[in-house]
Image (tube, coloured by chain):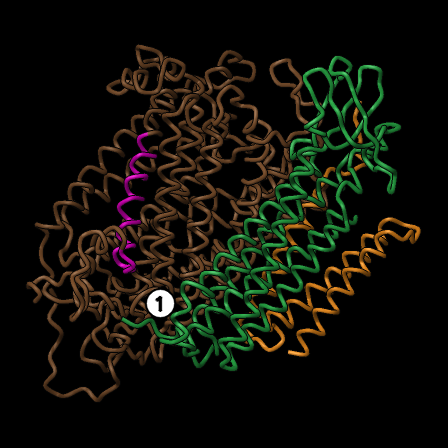
Amino acid sequence: METQQHDSSRAPEGHHDPGFWTRHIFSTDHKVIGMQYAVTALFFLLFGFFLMLMMRWQLAYPGHPIPLVGKALSRILGADMATKEGVMSPDLYNSFGAMHGTIMVFLAVVPLLAGAFGNFVMPLQIGAPDMAFPRLNMMSYQVYFLGGVTMFASFFIPGGAAKSGWTSYSPLASVNDMVHHPNGQTFWLIGMIFLITSSLLGSINTISTIIQLRAKGLTWMRLPFFVWAQFVTGFLLLLAFPPLEAAGCLQLMDNVFGTSFFLPTGLVVSGQPLHVAGGGSPLLWQHLFWFLAHPEVYVLILPAMGMVAEVIANNTRKPLWGYKSLVYGSLSLGFMSFIVWAHHMYLTGMGIRIATFFQTTTMMISIPSVVILTALLMSLWGGSIRLNTPMLFAVGFLPMFGIGGLSGLPLGFNASDIQLHDSYYVIGHFHYVVAPGTIFAIFAGLYYWYPKATGRMMNEYWGKVHFGLSMLFINLVFMPMFIQGLAGMSRRLYDGGATYAQAAGVTGLSPFILGLNKVISLAALALALAQIPFIINFFWSIKHGRKVTSDNPWDATTLEWQTPTPPPHGNFDKPMEVFRGPYEYSVPGKSRDFTPQNEPEQPEPAAHGNSAHS
Amino acid sequence: MRRHLLIAVALAAGTVTTIWTSQTDFGSFSLNVAMTLGIAGAQAVMVAAFFMHLLSEKKMICCLLVFTAFFFVMMMGLTLLARLPANVVHYK
Amino acid sequence: MEIPHTVEPREDTGLYNAKVGVWLFLASEVMLFGALFSSYILLRVGADPGTWPRHWLDYKLGAVNTIVLIISSVTNVIAWANLKMGSFRKYRNYQALTILCALVFLGIKSGEYYGKFHHYTIRLTDGRIADGHLQKNETTKDKVVIEGWWREGEAAVMDPPANVEEKKIEIERGKIADMRNYGPSRNNFAGLYFTMTGLHVLHVIGGILVIFAIWGPLNGMWKSDPRRYTNRVEVAGLFWSFVDLVWLFIFPTFYLL
């Protein structure tokens, strides 16, 4: 029978042991799939970080060989990508830039939020035995994996990976490499089709599960906010991704079959007219791309807000402030995210009326964002705050997201965007929301749910070190970018803006602004080193972390803490029934400061003592 | 079953009609487009309502489709409206 | 471990899981094909006058395909209705018709594609334009033989006159300035035609494979769990009706307007 540690992947009694392959590689159990997503996505997160470190070196010390890895680059990727000494070529810089964005957004953050946390936590939180379509779940991981392999492989093909930005604007994306067939852009498009398919299958599963598999008594307004966040995110992925899939097919046709959907008539490349039929519209690509990519940023932030909310409620020992406004805020945020996309296209020359429409909706959408952030902030008021590692990251998220969100306002106004568009200000803005924003929320979630998945706590001291160092260095990386952007430094420049410096004194970038490149790059390196304690802690604690003494080490109210640790196949040993809302903390008159959602209402026996805190 | 066959006949009739409307000259090409696509839309509604039993379907599904239709119209409409205005003023 | 509501509808939604799933999937497909139709409209409206072709596709073949898909849709629904009433035999027969219709559709479509790839517009060095289908058995390395027409000018290529008799045209290769077929790279109309009908064909193939699998190899479930089997047939049928619905828009857009 079983050993003392419950093995979550062991088959239920009476079944034959499914064997290694079915249990770990071809599992249909949402928890195993969630962990598969987590491991793969964390690998890509690190890889994307590594790409950026090499880019930051080039920005700080343009033309200097990259230490340690420079020579290897040339040997692995070829002489047109890096010189023998290890200096990065402009093409390599561009492909690192394009792939850093693609990998971080589509291979790391979204799979972590929706694939890892969504898969692992959400069914547990609604009291379900698994997702609605377990085999579809397995397929969506496998297609994601295929997409990841395709993207990773593209670095090693002749011509290298895609290098037209994660935004892949036509016509550059079609003409950037006309020598190699297939080229990195083709791989990117095929990879995107895999990833989008994986996302679609996953979102169908998420939404269906939340609608159909909620436990008895778990009404919509008793759902943990994390589940609401996953629900709205599911719809964003479901309805916004297909236009990008369509656009991807069209660009693939342009690149491989010689069509010209996005190539205008009369295009001349390197002095030669391009031999295509013409008549295409580069703007069409931009519309279809941003139709997805704007809702995509809400995909990046909503589940993160959900995780932060869970951690805050638990560690303030009081209900979330404004649960209803959180829910309605998320719903209106999701709805409006579909009609703001062209604020990424203010400089394309659309008519004034349409630009005003998008500006108006963009201003309006900041309202639910602020409502959600305010509700999370107000949730701290009067709380009995426990500053453990997950809570540090969750509370740290709040001002970071505040900076990120507020810095977006000048970008949302057409007039000010003229100055700031495509500058480092934009890079500062969106990284603040995603890096000290979403990624901090992901860390909060990892530290928080780790004991449920493994039965052990991560080391608290090193967790705090990880938090402190990350918080310090991440601000040193991204705050100077606002200054650089306001001074006029353009993004996607291989030489770190040095070209502009040639006109110093007239319209150039000052030595101070250029010097900030070195500050940022050093801070980025320090940030990378600050992740080492986390990585060691993560793996070391699986076998040597402090064992939990209860299934509910954080004394939480939501249903995922009512399972054995780690949860077995089927999750709950008896059907769940829910009697109250998700955040019944510090309810007056109760003997404990929390009441789990599934605990039946009963008069408190007089002899009942306080719960044992671990 | 009889109802399904009737709908199928109606759809076929629609197809024939739409061939006729597209080939007859009504004056303006836009009117041709409108009539042809209008018939196609009516056919689509019939398929959705009867073959996909949307008429008797639960509220949740209809709600989902209303939102989808809204986002689709927004995507198509705003993309078309955002085209470069024809009367661009050139400053000398 | 049983997933609840796989067969029994959930009380508050009145739906079983797969029905929710398939409608969500169809919503995403509306956005997918909708984006392609939006692209068509934008590109066509933005095309320079005289550069967007008309009457390049045989509407009669298209109409036949439309009727074939309509028939397949109705046989599919009737098959499901029979299954719901308990008659496996009638379901099996009607569904066989559905599969047959799908194969007819694919056959006609392949013929159309083949025709387009072998249909050439040849511009001669003396300025004349010939347009027709390549006769492979008569074409040599010295001359190209097509069965088609002489066109009066670009406008006649973009909007060919109807009902003109085809004739055999021989052209020396030396006199050819430019020769291109009606494949996807010909122009954006052709590109969109192949992309959209191609994507549609992929959906037809996918749909019919699923319907076939449920009808054939996987029909043992009718004995072990008939209600679940019926649900599977219904869900596949919803997808199939959607595929028909998309074609109802593709046909007038490409073949008629």
* Residue depicted at 36% across the width and 25% down the height: A156
Left or right of A524? Residue B8 is right
Looking at the rendering, in which quadrant would you find the C terminus of chain A? bottom left
Percent position (x, y) of residue A395? 31, 53
Residue A32 within the magenta-colored segment of the rendering = yes
Looking at the rendering, in which quadrant would you find the N terminus of chain A? bottom left
* Residue depicted at 38% across the width and 76% down the height: C223
Residue C244 within the magenta-colored segment of the rendering = no
The residue closer to the viewer here, A562 or A184, is: A184
Percent position (x, y) of residue A108? 35, 43
* Residue depicted at 66% across the width and 34% down the height: C117
Label 1 Cα neighbours within 10 Å, binned few <14 / some 14-19 / many ≥20: many
Rendered hue of chain C is green
Q: Is residue B83 above or below residue A481?
A: below
Colour orange belongs to chain:
B
Say whether residue A311 is visible: no
Chain assignment, label 1: A
Rendered hue of chain A is brown
Q: Is residue A604 above or below residue B19?
A: below
Percent position (x, y) of residue B19? 81, 55
The residue closer to the viewer here, C143 or A235, is: C143
Q: Quadrant of residue A427?
A: top left
Residue behind mark 1: A224
Q: Main secondary structure of the magenta part?
A: helix
Say whether residue C210 is visible: yes
The kind of residue on which mark 1 rests is: Pro
Q: Is residue B50 above or below residue C101?
A: below
The residue closer to the viewer here, A533 or C19, is: C19
Query: Magenta residues?
Result: A27-50
Q: Is residue A303 above or below residue C6?
A: above
* Residue depicted at 15% across the width and 51% down the height: A458
Give SS at disc 1: loop
